[in-house]
Amino acid sequence: MQPGKEKIFMKNGQLCEDIRDYKDRWKDANVIEFIQEPGQIVFVPSMWHHQVHNIEDAISINHNVINACNVDLIIELMRTRLVDVYREIEDVRSILSCEEFEEKCQLILNADIRINFSLFQRFLNMVIDERAIDAVKCWVCAQHTCIFECKKDDRCIERIRSCLKKSCKCDKHTALCENCDIFVKSFELTCAIHAKFLLDSDKYR
Ligand SMILES: [Zn+2]
Ligand SMILES: [Zn+2]
Ligand SMILES: [Zn+2]
Ligand SMILES: [Zn+2]
């Protein structure tokens, strides 16, 4: 279900274990229900609450993805978890040099969430290198200097949507038309550049 809709299934700040027990609330929450058939992949967008119920024996293979839509959330996650790591190994800080301590923390962060600042930096550089071609221009907003602010503004989202609609020439034979392809690339480039900027500002804090 869409982000926030899970509140409908909460009681005392606790999410109910099985939403099938509350079918009467499904309509309010716009719950999407489906059966995943053999050979099918399910893409769950960031922050969409989901429940999986195996109706027969099954093996689940999951991958988490970073894309332009959740890159800012990943930075937030890395920041909070790094603070946890700092706190957790605070007692050895005095026997290590500053660099050593930082290095150890990054190592633990990677073991914890499978990403750390340097890996993330490399990933962003790769995205920027690949997307920064002539046809691809950064998305510019008159109101916000940061694309992650636009994400929180309904008018900005509507502006992006209508801009995309106007130029779209997609048909059912092509996955993505030329204009949409360029749009996606510029959106990804913009988000990657802003994410890099956020990371750099962390480094020189
Ligand atoms: Zn899941
Ligand atoms: Zn920014
Ligand atoms: Zn904006
Ligand atoms: Zn299109």
Image (cartoon, rainbow, N blue to C red):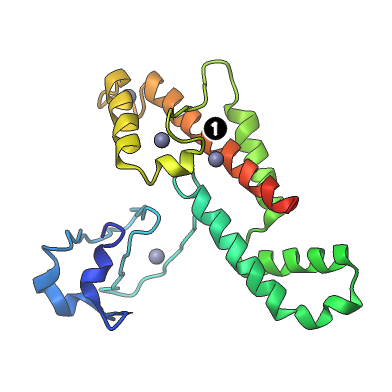
Q: Does residue 39 appear to the left or right of 66 in the view shown?
A: left
Q: Residues within 10 Å of mark 1 (few under 14, many from 20)?
A: many
Q: Is residue 128 visible?
A: yes
Residue depicted at x 32% and y 64%: 49
Relative to residue 89, is residue 100 depicted above or below? Answer: above
Q: Residue 46 at what x, y percent from top left?
A: 40, 55
Q: Residue 164 at what x, y percent from top left?
A: 33, 26
Relative to residue 70, is residue 155 depicted above or below? Answer: above
Task: For the C terminus, give its image quadrant.
Answer: bottom right
Which image quarter: residue 52?
bottom left
Q: Secondary structure at mark 1?
A: helix
Q: Residue 201 at what x, y percent from top left?
A: 68, 47
Relative to residue 166, is residue 39 depicted above or below? Answer: below
Task: For the N terminus, give its image quadrant.
Answer: bottom left
Residue depicted at x 42% and y 33%: 143
Residue depicted at x 18% and y 76%: 20
Q: Is residue 66 visible?
A: no
Q: Residue 9 at what x, y percent from top left?
A: 22, 74
What amino acid is at disc 1? Answer: Leu
Q: To which residue does mark 1 refer?
A: 189
Q: Does residue 5 appear to the left or right of 79 in the view shown?
A: left
| Viewer-closest of 97 and 35 | 97
| Viewer-closest of 127 and 85 | 85
Indicate the quadrant of ligand 4 in the picture.
top left
